[in-house]
Image (tube, rainbow, N blue to C red):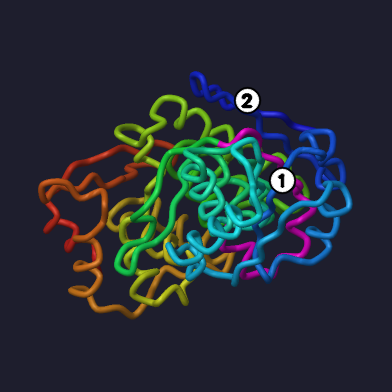
């Protein structure tokens, strides 16, 4: 088992990574506590069944799969039902699922009774290596992804790599885009290991490596005002592409296109294309430049017509550059 300490001052927590961990949930939490579980209707039923067998009388919410569940209506519905069920401020709420479930559950935890404990049990590669760690929680507005949210750290993150066995190849590769990003921005050896090795043979190592990279960045900048923005490589354009596709493009697919566009003119782009091809991730997409630009203009990272973009001159060394919002058009092809 691998345990990683996330040492954010006064908000410390651990990330435990171990095969079969889901079946040992009672070793990590008080299963006799007042517990709420939020999951979606696409999560393999055996995972929820395991939790129900370990936890005394949990209140369970199953929401529809996908970004549409990250909405104020879904959050409000769950909160009202928690109130009707007399869920107290001393309750624990568990996010069982992917990034959408983690974001939604964390957001509810951050506002219910002015804040209750929550834990992440991420079951997708994307959520295990990225969204479950760092405390960004939130929901979407009609016109902007993650427009409503907070920084709210979990009490613990429990990662069972065996849950990845039930993912489709498309969903697994969706998470690979974020893993590739970590290599690009911070670790050249990780990037080439992803390119050259079979990551399934040692998936626990690759998950822990990504979590450690994110930890090192987040503890320096919890509130995303400085160096943490480096984690957004490919995301500004990616989020716009997601919205433009009405989320038919998966997050990782949109980010992979964004990373490719932001790598234009740099020598490593050919290696990026090779690694994207290995994981069947796109780097081309049919879109209208002006439409994408209009989405980017509403990005919450735009301040006074300025935008911080992430660039990489060489693999493993990302940096932040401030540009005028109009300059982003130069990266759209």
**Does 95 sit above or below residue 320?**
below
Viewer-closest of 116 and 69 = 116
Which label belongs to residue 191? Answer: none
Where does residue 103 sit, x and y in percent of width and height?
51, 52
Which label belongs to residue 5? Answer: 2
In which quadrant will I find the C terminus? bottom left
Residue 61 belongs to magenta span: no
Residue at image location 53% in from the left, 31% down from the top:
215
> Hey, which quadrant is residue 262 in on the image?
bottom left
Q: Residues within 10 Å of mark 2 (few under 14, many from 20)?
A: some
> Hey, which quadrant is residue 89 in on the image?
top right
Where does residue 123 sit, x and y in percent of width and height?
69, 55
Viewer-closest of 276 and 153 = 153
Viewer-closest of 295 and 75 = 75
Viewer-closest of 171 and 87 = 87
Label 1 secondary element = strand
Residue at image location 84% in from the left, 33% down from the top:
27
Is any part of residue 238 visible from this angle? no
**Does 221 sit above or below residue 206?**
above
Residue 157 belongs to magenta span: yes
The earlier-in-sequence mark between 2 and 1 is 2
Residue lying at the far top of the rendered structure:
9
Q: Residues within 10 Å of mark 1 (few under 14, many from 20)?
A: many
Which residue is tagged 1? 35
Residue at image location 70% in from the left, 51% down from the top:
199
Residue 19 is left or right of residue 168, and the answer is: right
Residue 303 is left or right of residue 9, and the answer is: left
Where does residue 134 sit, x and y in percent of width and height?
50, 37
- What residue range appears in magenta? 154-175
Label 2 secondary element = strand
Q: Mark 2 against mark 1, which lies toward the viewer?
A: 1
């Amino acid at each position: 088992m691998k345990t990683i300490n996330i040492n954010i001052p006064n908000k410390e927590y651990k990330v435990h990574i171990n095969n079969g961990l889901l079946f040992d949930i009672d070793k990590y939490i008080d299963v006799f506590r007042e517990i709420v579980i939020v999951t979606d209707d696409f999560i393999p039923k055996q995972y929820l069944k395991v939790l129900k067998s370990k936890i005394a009388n949990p209140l369970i919410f199953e929401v529809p799969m996908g970004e549409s569940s990250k909405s104020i209506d879904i959050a409000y519905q769950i909160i009202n039902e928690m109130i009707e069920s007399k869920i107290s401020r001393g309750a624990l709420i568990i996010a069982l699922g992917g990034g959408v479930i983690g974001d939604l559950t964390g957001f509810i935890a951050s506002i219910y009774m002015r804040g209750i404990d929550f834990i992440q049990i991420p079951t997708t590669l994307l959520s295990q290596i990225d969204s479950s760690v760092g405390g960004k929680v939130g929901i979407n507005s009609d016109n902007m992804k993650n427009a409503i949210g907070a920084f709210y750290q979990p009490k613990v993150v429990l990662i069972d790599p065996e849950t990845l066995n039930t993912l489709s190849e498309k969903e697994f590769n969706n998470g690979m885009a974020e893993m590739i990003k970590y290599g690009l921005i911070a670790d050249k050896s990780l990037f080439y290991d992803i390119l050259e090795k079979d990551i399934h043979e040692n998936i626990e190592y690759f998950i822990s490596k990504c979590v450690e990279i994110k930890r090192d960045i987040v503890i320096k900048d919890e509130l995303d005002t400085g160096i943490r923005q480096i984690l957004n490589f490919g995301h500004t354009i990616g989020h716009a592409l997601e919205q433009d596709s009405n989320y038919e493009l998966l997050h990782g697919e949109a980010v992979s296109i964004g990373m490719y566009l932001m790598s234009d003119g740099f020598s490593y782009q050919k290696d990026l294309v090779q690694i994207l091809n290995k994981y069947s991730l796109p780097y081309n997409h049919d879109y209208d430049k002006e439409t994408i630009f209009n989405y980017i203009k509403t990005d919450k990272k735009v301040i006074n017509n300025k935008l911080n973009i992430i660039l990489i001159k060489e693999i493993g060394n990302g940096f932040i550059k401030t540009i005028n919002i109009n300059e982003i058009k130069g990266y759209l092809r």
